[in-house]
Image: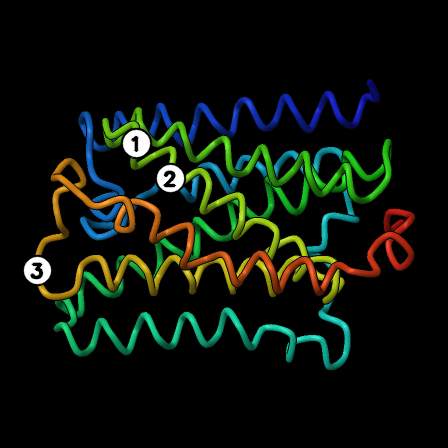
């Protein structure tokens, strides 16, 4: 195993500890995910992102996508997630937006989540794997890690089934974020899209009062709805990546 992959995996372990352990300490125990972004500034996300930025600067990994601008005309590829985000926010308006202070905290915290997770997965890990293997294995391993890490939300929320479903939805969404990263040539569109996606979904979750109890009885359709909701993202991602074996056979220098 290459030195870069070992360093990337080591950073992943530490980043996970910061995100989960420090996050739980900040919350003072179990908490719903929406509570972690609505109840004040969550410095855990900033700390996790800052750690990764230090690692990138230390190792001089200038290929993670932070120093690149999006390719000309590539931002039009974001039309599908943009429709989702606009739809979520429109529904939140209809249900009744939370107070402006809550919206502000959700926006700031969500953008830091987007920066932290995109830099970890579509930046550091994806590029580390690309230097040692073909592009599709790198995509699949990165997506599985991204989905798997969301199952650890059980240690934050205490809800195993909900965390497993979130894990599956994250895996599907992760394919789209990778497609955005590779097709635009920059990490920033994925960071902003990810952050605004979380902002829209958390705002919707906080709209109209408190979110529903994840432990209450649900139909099979209700449990699978998050997966069905993001399935078009994954299908669109596979279409965007249909030529990736040729266009991204080699990692960026």
Q: Which residue is mark 2?
A: 165
* Distance from the alpha carbon under mark 3 to that under mark 2: 23 Å
Image location (x, y in percent) of residue 170: 48, 45
Residue 93, above or below 63: below
Residue at screen point 12% across, 73% down: 96
Q: Nearer the viewer, mark 1 or mark 3?
A: 1
Query: Residue 12, which numbered label?
Result: none
Image location (x, y in percent) of residue 103: 23, 65
Is mark 1 in CB contact (under 8 Å) with mark 2? yes
Residue 138, above or below 152: below
Q: Earlier in the sequence, mark 3 or mark 2?
A: 2
Query: Residue 209, which numbered label?
Result: 3
Horizontally, residue 73 falls left or right of residue 245, namely: left
Residue 90, above or below 69: below
* Distance from the alpha carbon under mark 1 to that under mark 2: 6 Å
Q: Note whether residue 60 is visible.
A: no
Residue at screen point 82% across, 18% down: 1
Quarter of the image for residue 233 reads bottom right
Q: Note whether residue 7 is visible.
A: yes
Horizontally, residue 102 falls left or right of residue 107, namely: left
Q: Which residue is mark 1?
A: 161
Horizontally, residue 223 falls left or right of residue 113, namely: left
Looking at this view, name the residue that lies furthest to the front: 220
Q: Secondary structure at mark 2?
A: helix
Q: Return the residue nearer the eye: 189 or 226.
A: 226
Q: Secondary structure at mark 1?
A: helix
């Amino acid at each position: 195993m290459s030195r870069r992959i070992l360093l990337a995996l080591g950073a992943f372990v530490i980043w996970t500890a910061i995100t989960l352990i420090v996050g739980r300490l900040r919350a003072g125990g179990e908490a719903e995910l929406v509570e972690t972004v609505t109840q004040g500034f969550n410095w855990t996300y900033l700390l996790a992102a800052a750690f990764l930025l230090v690692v990138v600067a230390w190792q001089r990994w200038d290929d993670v996508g932070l120093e690149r601008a999006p390719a000309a005309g590539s931002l039009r590829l974001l039309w599908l997630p943009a429709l989702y985000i606009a739809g979520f926010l429109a529904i939140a308006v209809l249900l009744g937006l939370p107070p402006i202070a809550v919206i502000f905290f959700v926006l700031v915290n969500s953008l830091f989540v987007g920066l932290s997770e995109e830099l970890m997965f579509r930046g550091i890990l994806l590029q580390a794997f690309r230097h040692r293997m073909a592009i599709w294995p790198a995509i699949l391993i990165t997506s599985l890690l991204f989905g798997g890490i969301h199952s650890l939300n059980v240690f934050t929320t205490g809800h195993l089934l909900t965390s497993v479903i979130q894990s599956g939805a994250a895996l599907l969404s992760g394919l789209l974020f990778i497609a955005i990263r590779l097709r635009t040539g920059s990490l920033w569109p994925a960071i902003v899209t990810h952050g605004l996606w979380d902002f829209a979904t958390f705002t919707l979750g906080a709209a109209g009062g408190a979110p529903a109890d994840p432990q209450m009885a649900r139909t099979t359709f209700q449990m699978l709805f998050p997966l069905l909701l993001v399935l078009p993202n994954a299908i669109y991602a596979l279409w965007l990546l249909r030529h990736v074996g040729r266009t991204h056979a080699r990692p960026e220098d």
